[in-house]
Image (cartoon, rainbow, N blue to C red):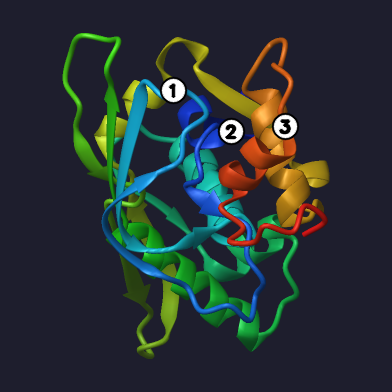
Amino acid sequence: ALETHRHIPNEYARSSLFTVRRPRDARRSFTRQHLFHYNDYIKVLFTGVELRALDDEPVFMQLVHYGQSVALGQPFKFTLSGFIEDLGWPRNGESYIRLKDCFSRLSAAELYFENTKAYGKSPVFRLLKHYEATNDANGNVHSYQAVLDRSLIIFFAGNTFTSHHWQTYRKLSPVARRLADYAGSHKAPYDLNIEMFRKLCDSGTKNKRS
């Protein structure tokens, strides 16, 4: 994998897992909510607090990037300051809180994917299985350790993922990220009408200019 790129499973890219909503809109809480997926034979159920393309999506992709350094399901370490730098966020207290909030949402989110055209297991899993902070001798947080769910292998096996050039992708607006996700998840993208794209973003508005 190229250091310059970050990756997201195609099935996430083609669903409304990461939404596009106005920052001031309160995040919704779901229990086994049926999410939109471009392919109607893929069933996605989501439990947790709404995840957004604005912040949760790039944080998840960066976690996957860090996790490539170890076998899936094994712990890996990082610092919050390094994470924020990799995201391109400003180095301030607000970013640290924002990042920790993303960790909380990702670890609490429960996903269930079912392919009605395929035979096999349909696991229930979390986007971030576990994370913990390590303090130094003075009691200050020194680093973090995280573990990704081993079930993620299902979504990355056989090159079934989309790779984005990170320096470009992280600067995109949430709407542009969702469009890049959709286009990148197909070798030759099908035409995407406005209504279908609105569902992909789960924007909550009928306004086609939003």
Q: Earlier in the sequence, mark 3 or mark 1?
A: 1
| Residue 100 vs residue 13, the one in the foreground | 13
Disc 2 marks which residue? 7
Q: Earlier in the sequence, mark 2 or mark 3?
A: 2
Q: What x and y, as percent, mark residue 165?
A: 76, 35
Can residue 3 be seen at all in this image of the molecule?
no
| Residue 94 vs residue 77, the one in the foreground | 94
- How far apart, in angstroms, are the residues tagged by discs 3 and 1? 27 Å
Judged by depth in the image, the label closer to the viewer, 2 or 3, is: 3
Type of the residue with mark 2 = His
**Residue 156: which disc?**
1
Q: What x and y, as percent, mark residue 58?
A: 60, 52
**Residue 67 versus residue 42 in the image, above or below:** below
Q: Earlier in the sequence, mark 1 or mark 2?
A: 2
**Circle 1: is it few (<14), some (14-19), or many (20+) Cα within 10 Å?**
some
Contact, mark 1 vs mark 2 (Cβ under 8 Å): yes
Disc 3 marks which residue? 193
